Amino acid sequence: MKKRFLGLSVAFGAAVLASSMVQGQSNTITIGGYDGATDTALVSELIAKFVKPKLAADGVDVKYVPTADFGKAIQTQLSSGTAPDLFYLEDFAAKSLISSGKIMPLNGMVNLKDFLPSLNSVFSSGGKQYGIAKDFNTLVMYYNRDLFDQAKVSYPDADDTWNDFTTKITNVQKALGKGFAGTCFPGSYDRFGAFAASTGWKPILSGKTTILDANFRRAFTWYTNLVKSGVAVKPSQINAGWGGDCMKSGKVATAFEGGWALGFLRDQAPNLKYGTTLLPRDPTSGKRGNLIYTVAWAVNNGTKNKTAAIKVLNALTSVEAQQFVLRGGLALPSRISLQDDPYLSGTGVENVAFRNVFKGASDGNAVPFAPDRFGGDWFRGIDEALNSVMDGQKTVDQAVRDAQRSINTVMAR
């Protein structure tokens, strides 16, 4: 669950795939994903409700095979010819996997008209579409209403700047004392990047990444100073794995997560009284920033049953399947026709949260999470820089210079 969204990625062993082959054609379409309990339950339910009924007459079975460490496994399996028939294509890994030639172009096989072009563009190359965006997410601020009430501090709201937010969470921490924190700031770009974007900084501009400019450094300094001052904690400092765990603990006033945290809090912290609001604005630019996360279904170019695999993809991205995911409190649909779904106009805490998630994609400087074709290596330098400053190992100047060199090396490959 600490991942930026409830991604459904795929990988599994050659023996499993081989067992599904019958005379050169697979009578089983295999779908893989992360091995967490939530992911397993969700994909299994999608298959049972929306996929199997549409393939029953074809005599084709559909199976979900979860695995750990998807990012490494899928690359190896695509190379060795043991990848599943259908798999989740993550935004930040899309370009490198598409360039491998192992993913099937979908033009002419899937109707693209009802999908948001801005999302599907992440999974296209050379005029061809290689993945169909299933959903998307942005970050919102989750806040513990009880902690703010006990501290007699007003709730965070959409008008807050970084300075307002800092004042509020500092006052909450002071009022509640030792053992409480104002917010949860992981040392990773997948949360920090939203604040960098609010300054007007662009992750990649004219083919280059520059983190030595004043805008990036302003966000970097503010973010790391909150941890160094003790007002914010990294999740690991309170034995948490991600922001959802921080909120569940009842000891942290705020956290920044996407819609994927809703189901977790519903199940793991049913008594938590919380609210959500948009991210605070950079006081200099006057803008708020955000990251847009999206994932896609992709088809293995080497599948033994392309017709059935496409049918499964269409079922998983159908209006009914996307509506099911939306109303389960997981992610926003990629279909244009569902952007006005009644669920998004409700007054419940989860309905409000998803409205805020939706607003996050257009209110201010929202940028794609994916760093073009550079994959996870692009993040590493920034992540290391954040942690080195938060942990007191480097100054901001040292950390940012080292991160710039790391990014330059990655982008020169």
Image (cartoon, rainbow, N blue to C red):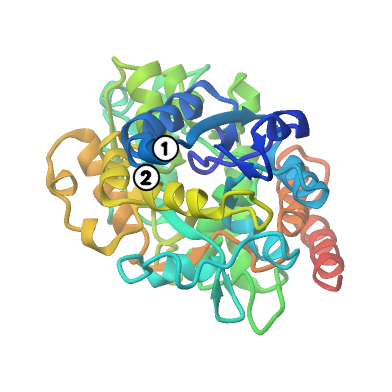
Q: Residue sitting at 24 percent across and 50 percent down? A: 355
Q: Nearer the viewer, residue 261 or 109?
A: 109
Residue 159 in picture, x, y percent from top left: 28, 56
Residue 243 location (% of width, % of height): 50, 33
Badge 2: few (under 14), some or many (20 or more) residues near its Cα, within 10 Å? many
Marks 2 and 1: in contact by CB < 8 Å?
yes
Between 197 and 171, the one nearer to me in the picture: 197
Q: Amino acid at mark 1?
A: Trp
What distance separates the C-alpha of mark 1 from that of mark 2? 6 Å
In this rendering, does residue 157 appear at all? no
Task: Classify 250 as above or below 160.
Answer: above
The part of the image, by quadrant, that contains residue 248 is top left
Q: Which mark is residue 260?
A: 1
For the residue pair 381 and 48, the one nearer the viewer reads as 48
**For residue 35, above or below residue 345:** above
Vertical position of residue 251 compared to residue 205: above or below:
above
- For the point 55% across and 81% down, the residue is 127
Residue 390: percent from left, percent from top: 70, 41
User: Looking at the rendering, in which quadrant would you find the C terminus?
Assistant: bottom right
Mark 1 nearby-residue class (10 Å; few <14, some 14–19, many ≥20): many
Disc 2 residue type? Answer: Ala
Give residue 136's position: percent from left, percent from top: 41, 53
The vertical placement of 152 against 87, above or below, is: above
**Residue at the disc numbered 2:** 331
Quarter of the rendering containing residue 150:
top left
* Residue sitting at x 17%, y 57%: 340
The disc, 1 or 2, on the residue closer to the chain's N-terminal end is: 1
Q: Left or right: where does residue 343 sit relative to residue 3?
A: left
Q: Residue at coordinates 87% horizontally, 67% vertically from top-left?
A: 409
- Is residue 96 in sight in this rendering? yes
